[in-house]
Image (spheres, grey):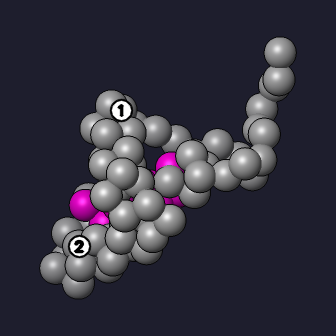
Amino acid sequence: MDPPFISGRAALADAAELLERFGDQAGLAAAARAETSRDAGNVTRFCHWRQIERVIATLSSDEVGGTVH
């Protein structure tokens, strides 16, 4: 799995907040926010929450990715 693109500190902060608040359901919470944004026609926020969904999946994974030193 390729690591997700992380646009900045706000993306990590949003992912961490959802993980803290929703635990194992954080990815579903991000998906719901993406769907709400899409339904409202807000493409920018839709893309943001989809990115957060991928960041949460990466942070929650036990799989080692990239170079291990």
Numbered tag placed on residue 42 in the rendering: none
The residue nearer to you, when weighing 43 against 1, is 1
Place of residue 33 in the rendered image (x, y in percent of width and height, measured from the top left): 28, 71
Q: Quadrant of residue 42?
A: bottom left
The residue nearer to you, when weighing 66 against 22, is 22
Figure check: 69 above or below 49: above
Q: Quadrant of residue 37?
A: bottom left
Relative to 58, is 66 on the left or the right?
right
User: Which residue is tagged 1?
Assistant: 8
Relative to 4, is 6 on the left or the right?
left
Task: Using a 10 Å C-alpha cutoff, classify the residue at mark 1 as few (fewer than 14 neighbours), some (14 to 19) or many (20 or more).
Answer: few
The residue nearer to you, when weighing 64 against 46, is 64
Figure check: 65 above or below 58: above
Numbered tag placed on residue 37 in the rendering: 2
Determine the residue positioned at 23% across, 84% down: 39
Q: Main secondary structure of the magenta part?
A: helix
Relative to 23, is 68 on the left or the right?
right
> Considering the numbered disc 1 on the image, is that residue within a helix, a strand or a loop?
loop
Determine the residue positioned at 77% across, 32% down: 66
Magenta stretch: includes residue 17: no
Figure check: 30 above or below 62: below
Place of residue 44 in the rendered image (x, y in percent of width and height, measured from the top left): 26, 59
Determine the residue positioned at 45% across, 70% down: 25
Magenta range: 45-55
Q: Residues at badges 1 and 2 in contact (C-beta under 8 Å)?
A: no
Q: Quadrant of residue 69?
A: top right
Determine the residue positioned at 38% across, 45% down: 16
The residue nearer to you, when weighing 17 against 41, is 17
Task: Using a 10 Å C-alpha cutoff, classify the residue at mark 2 as few (fewer than 14 neighbours), some (14 to 19) or many (20 or more).
Answer: some
Q: Can residue 11 be spotted in the picture? A: no
